[in-house]
Image (cartoon, rainbow, N blue to C red):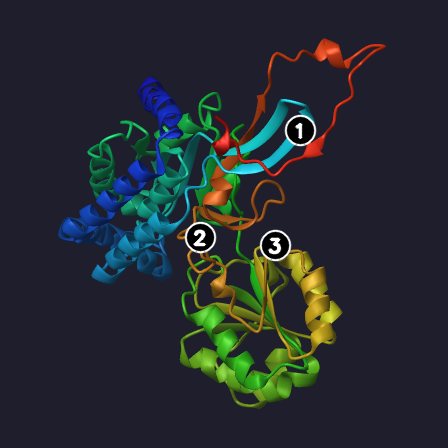
Amino acid sequence: MVKDIETKVVKAKKASIELSDVSEEVKNRALEAMAKALDRERKAIIEANLKDLEYAAELKKTGKLTQALVDRLKVTDSKVDGMIAGIRDVIGLKDPVGDTLATLELDNDLILYQVSCPIGLIGVIFESRPDVVPQVMSLCLKSGNATIFKGGSEARESNRTIFEILVKAIESTEGMPKGAFQLMETREEIMSLLSLDAYVDLLIPRGSNEFVKFIQDNTKIPVLGHTSGICHIYVDEFADLDTAWKVCFDAKVQYPAVCNAIETLLINRKIAEAFLPKMAEMYIGAGVELRCDEDSYSLLAEKGLSPLSRATEEDWSLEYNDLILSIKLVDTIKAAIDHINTFGSHHTDGIITENISRRKEFIGLIDSSSVMVNASTRFADGYRYGKGAEVGISTNKIHSRGPVGMEGLLIYKYILMGKGQVVADYAGENAKPYTHRKLDLKFEDVD
């Protein structure tokens, strides 16, 4: 088994070298072939997905899968349309490979270029959501990265069908290397992959807190991702109430099973009576379970609202990924900021306020990869950020942060163009000086 996995990985690693040098024109043709293949084969995709949904229903009965995760798994015609649109958005993005990031003259006719290039071989490990396959494959292809995919067992039929359709389209495109994209389907395969740090350059896990933490703890391969999405909105005393009701409802209810949905709502005590009862009515009407601190519980109970439950200390650190929300009243914006920086996961947090100084204070002090002002946290997404799609969301503070598109799949190399210069001439008693002059030159224009 391990040898078989290594063979797949080595094949993809070799193909990554070829893929890194494929022209934009060929990559775009392959992407268009992918989009057309999905459209042509949508019936096969939906039929495969129905098998997964049957299996997921059994998992739900035994408590191994929540309804929210079952919903994420479902593929419909509109979901296929979204996959196709995402691929075509990537076609419209500029090819990022080979961009000149900086040019420095070391001396006459000794020019140093910093040029963008693919990372190499990326492993993407994800749960549920079969639409991850076309999203990530399109971004990796356009950025010249070979990719190993491993999805959850609950989406096996969907993942396999979509993967095979896309790879057939890619490899039938003239000029595209074969073997750059590989699929793994078992837990044993993923454990083998985690040990292959000699070949895999980056891992991107997408899933639960426990899942991402497990990946991070069991590999030497660099990991890009976030362990959880504990997101907040703070409703300031200077909030516009109509804005607050609308935004806070969307941030929890529009799609509760994703990492950018809020898990805790913080409310300034001075605005609580005017804001919270109507907000709670809206949530309860949408089926949201409210877990309240003592003050918010008392306020809502006095208004006769139910059902309610009391939040525990553990609730402030939980990612529900479901129609559950914890609520807390705070006295000051500082208390809200302290709570978010203490209990949050540095993913996405927002403020509702019309006060400029409050807005600036919140933006400056919140240590999160995305900060929203009078807007839903659900906007923290690669597609919505104009990246075509995303490979994941990172709370790391090195390389990439926030929704990661193609820019997070690139690194750079240095290219020094000279005419026989040697270091000996720049050392010793009569050393030549370096000019170290920045130039406005592009490596692509070098003859």
Q: How many marks?
A: 3
On residue 346, which mark appears? Answer: 3
Q: CA distance from mark 1 to mark 3?
A: 40 Å
Q: Is residue 258 visible?
A: yes
Quarter of the rendering containing residue 105: top right
The spot of residue 140 in percent (x, y) is 39, 39
Residue bearing mark 1: 105
339 and 41: which is toward the camera = 41
Picture residue at 28% right of the left edge, 31% below the top? 176
Establish if 235 lies above or below 400.
below
Decide which of 271, 445 is in the foreground and name it.
445
> Residue at position x 62%, y 26% from top?
111
Q: Which residue is mark 2?
A: 387
Please state if 24 lies on the left or on the right of 411 as rendered: left
Which amino acid type corresponds to the residue marked 1 in the rendered image?
Glu
Crowd around label 2: few <14 · some 14–19 · many ≥20 (10 Å): many
What residue sits 40% from the left and 34% below the top? Answer: 145
Marks 2 and 1, how far apart at CA: 33 Å
User: Which residue lies at the image location 65% right of the left edge and 80% below the top edge?
Assistant: 354
Q: Say whether disc 1 or disc 3 marks the residue closer to the N-terminus.
A: 1
Pick the residue in front: 75 or 441: 441
